[in-house]
Image (tube, rainbow, N blue to C red):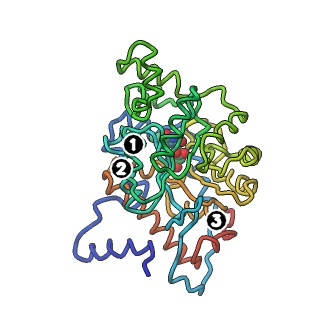
Amino acid sequence: GMNYGDYQLGIYMNGARGVLPDLPMDSAAMEELAKSRMDPRILGYVAGGAGNEYTQRANVAAFERLGIMPRMLVGAAQRSMGINLFGHALPSPLFFAPVGVLGAVTDDGDLATAASSAELGMPMVASTLSQAPLEQVRTAAGETPGFFQLYPPADRELAESLVHRAEAAGYSGIVITLDTWVNGWRPRDLSAAYLPMLTGQCLANYLSDDRFRKLLAEQGSTDPAAAVMLWASLFGNPTMTWEDLEWFRSLTSLPIVLKGICSPEDTRRALDGGMDGIYCSNHGGRQANGGIPAIDCLPGVVEAAGGAPVLFDSGVRSGVDALRALALGATAVGIGRPYVYGLAAGGQAGITHVMRSLLAEADLTMAVNGYPDLDSLRGSLHRL
Ligand code: FMN
């Protein structure tokens, strides 16, 4: 049968006839190429993080302290990276983390990501902040299940409307992001005095929403500037607390996952509150500096989750990083900035290339080290 690692065969075969890959073969090189092709303000928004970006760098560096023990003569000729997530059999454990400015990187960034999701069978968590409305993003993802990421707004009826639209559009679950009810301190964006949404970008889910439009009409002015101001006043919900979970739970029978959880106590509280899964993440160090590398929080979250699905992101830059998170007990691993750079460097083909490369590296690392499936990886890590 086929293994994801076979992606390298075509590349070497092309080379034998003198054809080199037209896109970079590792995350760092892809990032460099993307940066040369991006508008400086968008680049700052994507590449930047909170404060001096210590947490963002630490997220990435922490993976290097985790080594995988090689085992020989296992007979790992055929590998499987398949997982089951909320009843969906998926071919791989990777997914597209929600990114809210895909439509500012390229006009069709949300739909290009959804098309790669369809092509690879890899779920996309579609951001609230998209240039294409959530219904169009869902359609472009075809048969591949996907999740809708909700930034809980200050208006309950708007939250309800977005959740119900996601349900009607065919999403398989709701990811509620908790760590962004206020924008973190981001010197790069501050220096450029730039937030894409304030220029009217990536607000399609609001502008197409009946509840939002009703509120806008009540304001008296429906011009673009008024819409942006209304959005800014509703974007975050500063008074949301654990008490609100019951209400969110009552909105939908879809699985609900809380994103931004890093502590075992919060994990237990979420699951006790009827949530279906945990998304361990520190938002790639974009929100708070001086934090803990997300991968170092993962074992505590997995233990507290007691078998409930744990999604993970923040700092994954290679297929090996994905394996490290899986070995620590993550159910599925989110890729963030690397696919955004793939999009900026090579459009939809760039996104697919990034994901295929990550999968190939993960698969070949499992092969070399003698781990034929993800279960066997558990307990394979040594802290360096
Ligand atoms: N997370 C959300 O929950 N919703 C978003 O709309 C969102 N937008 C993002 C936009 C950009 C440009 C980036 C880089 C991240 C965004 N995130 C958002 C966070 C990602 O989902 C993810 O947690 C983060 O990218 C992981 O860090 P990494 O990319 O360094 O691995």
Q: Nearer the viewer, residue 126 or 214?
A: 214
Q: Is residue 380 left or right of residue 223?
A: right
Q: Quadrant of residue 329?
A: bottom right
Look at the image and tell me whether residue 169 can be seen: yes
Residue position marked by numbered label 1 in the rendering: 102
Q: Check the image and report above or below for 81 versus 55.
A: below
Amino acid at the residue labelled 2: Leu
Question: In what quadrant of the picture does the N terminus appear?
Answer: bottom left
Q: Is residue 74 left or right of residue 2?
A: right
Residue position marked by numbered label 2 in the rendering: 343
Give percent across and percent down for residue 346: 31, 52
The residue carrying pointer 1 sits among few (fewer than 14), some (14 to 19) or many (20 or more) residues within 10 Å by Cα, namely many
The residue carrying pointer 3 sits among few (fewer than 14), some (14 to 19) or many (20 or more) residues within 10 Å by Cα, namely many
Q: Quadrant of residue 30?
A: bottom left
Q: Residue at x 62, y 69 (%)?
A: 68
Q: Earlier in the sequence, mark 3 or mark 1?
A: 1
Instruction: Compute the Cα span from label 3 to label 1.
Output: 30 Å
Give percent across and percent down for residue 298: 67, 54
**CB under 8 Å between callouts 1 and 2?**
yes
Q: Check the image and report above or below for 171 versus 181.
A: below
Residue position marked by numbered label 3 in the rendering: 327
Q: Residue at x 44, y 73 (%)?
A: 5
Question: In what quadrant of the picture does the C terminus appear?
Answer: bottom right
